Image (cartoon, rainbow, N blue to C red):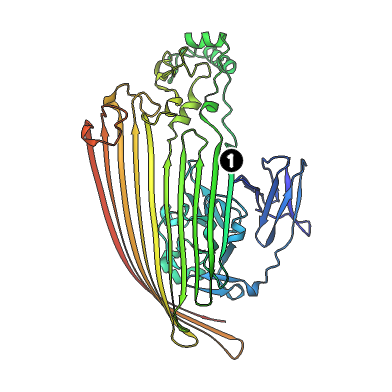
Amino acid sequence: AYHRVIGQNGEPVPRASVTVKGSSAGVTAGDNGNFEISAPSNGTLVVSAINFSSQEVNINNRASLEIILVPSNVVMGSEVVVIGYGTQRKKDVTGSTVSVKGETLNEIKAPNIFNQLQGRAAGVDIQNNSSQIGATGQIRIRGNRSLTNSANNPLIVVDGMAYGGSLNDINPDNIASVDILKDASATAIFGSRGASGVVIITTKRGANQKSVVSVNSYVGVVDVIDTYNLFSGEEYAKFKDDAKAGNSGSAPNTTNYALTPDETANLAAGVNTDWQDLLLTTGMRTSHDLNVRGGNDRTQYSFGGGYYRETGVTRDQVLNRFTFNVNIDHKLSERIKVGFTSFNTLVRSNRLGTNAYGAATRLSPLYKPYKDDGSLNFQPAIQQGVDFTQINPLTSIGNDELIRAFSRRYQFQHNFYGEVKILKDLKFRSTFGYGWSQTANNNYEGPNTVFNTNANTAGSRLSSVNSEGWQYTINNSLEYNTVFAGRHKLQAQVLQEIQKNYYRNQQFNGTGVPADFIQDYNWQQVFTVNPQGTSNGGAVLDERGLIGYM
């Protein structure tokens, strides 16, 4: 049944975000306010929309819900928006911006900011590129502006510095606010780098208060919304029988449409294998975050650590993420202020490819996954001519020696700043940022698996890829901000930014591993090795100025 989101005036609220509390399941309502969602009959829905206050609605076994949202009571004149390298009151901003607070984001328990922002920013399209655990999402601000896909990515700025890492590496629990600059007026201070929009993330900082310790934890499940509606054993036999009656007996992907002897025997025995069900499972998400915030009138601090674990809907997929964040601000005098920001991430994952699921959708339901002796039926379709290459997808599960797809990524960003108040309305700020990332991908595909149909060790394949990159940025800004005659506000800003980056990649591919347990631990025993490598770098000097009058 359809549910509906409306305002107090009875008009539909378009594109409202609807999520199931305590899980990552969610949908976006249509332009008419209607939506469908799978949720427990005793569950709770969290409904939010731009310019409306979020609302929690208990389902209470009701088949149809009409949810009335109340307009947000935020006073525009008092709301502060981060724009580029400073802040302004929202009513003073002439460009198109969207601001989402961290409290609003955390209403949805999700592993990354992509899931939390969906449906909460008008003109911003957020999509998941893959169902693989740890896969990155895609942000498009007011559509694509270039034929080159990477050129459509918005500029990401974290705590005032351009960020080149993955948004998946930022702990959502550490985000204080997200501001999205959408048009040329709002992004002007960033020059051409902001042509596809700018996403500004501000992390949590300390405050003049006693130390406050907060702990946030949640556990959720990850499930497949829907699977392919495949033939049962009897339906498949009927389909092949009908195809054989109207065909000459040959086809491009099989010797004929008739059932093989094994299929005929298994049909009589009542075999009906659901290959999807054997391969898929219910994944789990676990998140634990610890934060300490406090300070006094001179020093404020914020420390945070987080652990996130996810198991995928395909068996043997595991991701572990560790994060640690530090923010310190210290006032040396009434005119001088210094600070330090650091966020660090370690991600380890074991992710299988999509070949296994593809094989699960192609295999006949009239084949057995296991032989009579309990061992895996490696090539169930061996009698099916060309189709004999379809390998049992279960060969990808539960054998760490045969299949290995391990990835490790470590990333950190350290920023140091100093700020001097030269005059009452004039201040100078200089920031130095250094970021470094390292990624290692190690893959091994032994023989007789769904990924590698070679039957002997000479055909075993392995690869090892190591990527490393660093970037440093120096940002200097001189800002003048004053109000005169009681009503006239003048703001002027001069910026200089120096940036340098370097990236290198080393890759080794090999075939012919003597034994599965060796994998990539001893390359000297690999029969054939093919090394590859690349490196590149660049530097940018950018100077800009901005003047505003209200």
**Residue at image mark 1:** 221
User: Is residue 54 or residue 303 the one in the foreground?
Assistant: 303
Expressed as whole percent of the image width and height from the top left, the position of residue 233 reads 57, 17
Rendered image quadrant of residue 528: top left
At 72% across and 63% down in the image, what residue appears? 71
Rendered image quadrant of residue 444: top left
Answer few, some or many: residues within 10 Å of disc 1's Cα (few below 14, many 20 plus, some between 14 and 19).
Answer: some
For residue 17, side relative to residue 534 (left or right):
right
Expressed as whole percent of the image width and height from the top left, the position of residue 392 reads 44, 23
Is the N terminus in the top left, top right, bottom left or bottom right quadrant?
A: top right
User: Is residue 292 or residue 254 the one in the foreground?
Assistant: 292
Outermost residue, front side: 210
Q: Is residue 181 visible?
A: no
At 62% across and 71% down in the image, what residue appears? 79
Q: Please name the amino acid that badge 1 sits on.
A: Val
Expressed as whole percent of the image width and height from the top left, the position of residue 16 reads 66, 53
On screen, residue 332 above or below 368: below
For residue 165, side relative to residue 46 (left or right):
left
For residue 371, side relative to residue 38 (left or right):
left
Expressed as whole percent of the image width and height from the top left, the position of residue 322 reads 45, 51
